[in-house]
Amino acid sequence: MLIFSITLFVLATFLGYELISKVPPLLHTPLMSGANAISGITLVGAILAAGTGASNLSTYLGLFAVIFATINVVGGFMVTRRMLLMFKKSTKKD
Amino acid sequence: MDQLIQIAYLLAASSFILGLKFLSSPETAPRGMLLAQGGMLVAVIATLLNYGIVSYGLILSGIVIGAAIGTLMATKVQMTDMPQMVALLNGFGGLSSALVGGAEYLRAQPNLTPQAVITIALTVLIGMATLTGSLIAFAKLQALMKSAPLLFRFQHGLNFLLFLIALGLFAVLTVAPGTSFAFWALAALAAILGFLIVIPIGGGDMPVVISLLNSYSGLAAAASGFVLSNTVLIISGSLVGSAGIILSQLMCKAMNRSLANVLFGGFGHAETAAQTVAGDSAEKAPPPAQPEVQSATPEAAAEIFKKAKSVIIVPGYGMAVAQAQHTVKSLATLLQAQGTTVSYAIHPVAGRMPGHMNVLLAEADVPYDQLIDMDDINEDFENTDVSLVIGANDVVNPAADTDPESPIYGMPILHVEGSKTVMVLKRSMKPGFAGIENPLFFKPNTLMIFGDAKGTVERMVAALA
């Protein structure tokens, strides 16, 4: 399982590198906030931690993980959208 | 059921990959992000269907609280404050991964394998360091603490010592995974390390730091994916990890400095020293060989604008601080109305995060095809009547080309000095972030216009209208 995880990690890193290299500097700020929202996928881990009800303390840690990950996801995606909608092309035709 | 969940995770990971791919153009980008949001929703719902989940109420209340706070932050934040917002979100991402690690450590007791405990410890280490590092970055950007580098004796020695202790705690946990004390001590140590790593970094280097912390928040998520053997966490975390790495590389290249130099160099420390020197010499007689700068009023500058055929606007962090982007846009509209071509030259490290200037100008309704990257606009300055530098300094400092002694020697700059007239909007003659004299200010074709950037541009607009 570990070697499978490492394989995924390495391949996804290469893929990420290729993808991000194509993002123009114009969009670097939305890229960061968008990437931020995507890293909020840790919410999945947080739900598992909070929901499987092992011990009291681990449930509470999980609950806080859910809260912060959700802030990351919701805040990140919303602010990215807000920014992306501001980018407009010239209306005048050249 | 388990298979279905895995398929849902695959869909989510694919949607993130496409979302990032669509970010290659401003036209497709909003669609891409919508797709990624959909993917996130699918991943969350699939996880909630996991048969092991018992406490739905708790999870849903957590999601509601988090969504409310996130919505509030995203709708209230000013575009000028984007760097702080991203710093804070990075920190929250790191914290959440660290918490997942902590919860998993408690849950998996007493059957922890050395392999499991190492991945958990790594998650907590990266997550906690990301949290405190981001909080310091936030505090510096929000001016809650001085943005100048904080340096003290034996700083690197202390960091190295703490790093060694962290390695020792790792070793203890590998041998005896149940040593709770070592685990929590490692979490605390990681928090201290994150704090110590960011305090010696100055405000102008924040683009690099934020990119790096962005990368760490992704790595923390990937590490928690290793802990839970969760594919979507590993894939998304590493995508974000590489995004941050690329951006920090680009930022370093745009400053002609290595990452190590940014992290350990305490660059910008000269700022305070240079300021005191400038203060002293102002009280005494000015140095004899110092050429005089030419200054002008905004109204005199407006007269020059009236005759200009082409204008390039060079925005910097000072424009963000003065919230001048909307006024600048009004000026550009007036100039365009009289037939002058206007474009904006964007240096990669202008502002406090990658792409900061683009977002501010987009907010002010400047069409993005007028925002031109450094490499594409540099040859145009020669044929330009007026370059208007607003709150930028080091990115237009010709010393980077000509003076091998200069700390910024070799840094790629915008060659505004080639245009017929250069107008520099600045509060005072105080040196910029790097604390370096700017020979541009003393050139015969340079006009200094002192004052608050917004006020100055408003007066130009009034004179032109």
Image (cartoon, rainbow, N blue to C red):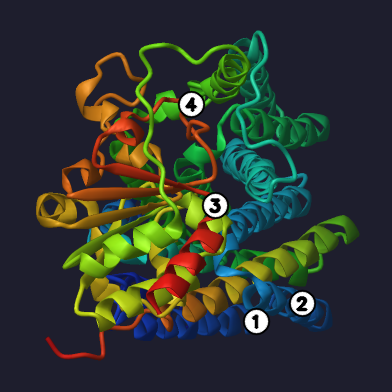
Q: Secondary structure at mark 4?
A: loop
| Gap in angstroms between the C-alphas marked 2 and 3 | 22 Å
What amino acid type is highlighted by mark number 3? Ser
Q: Which chain is mark 1 on?
A: B
Residues under numbered marks 2 and 4 in contact, where contact means CB atoms less than 8 Å apart: no
In the displayed structure, A52 sits above or below B262; it is: below
Foreground mark, 2 or 4? 4
| Gap in angstroms between the C-alphas marked 1 and 4 | 54 Å
Q: Which chain is mark 4 on?
A: B
Q: Which mark is residue B59?
A: 2
Residues under numbered marks 2 and 1 in contact, where contact means CB atoms less than 8 Å apart: yes
Which residue is tagged 3? Answer: B217
Tell whether B79 sits left or right of A71: left
Q: Are marks 2 and 3 on the same chain?
A: yes
Which residue is tagged 1? Answer: B48
Foreground mark, 3 or 1? 3
Q: Secondary structure at mark 1?
A: helix
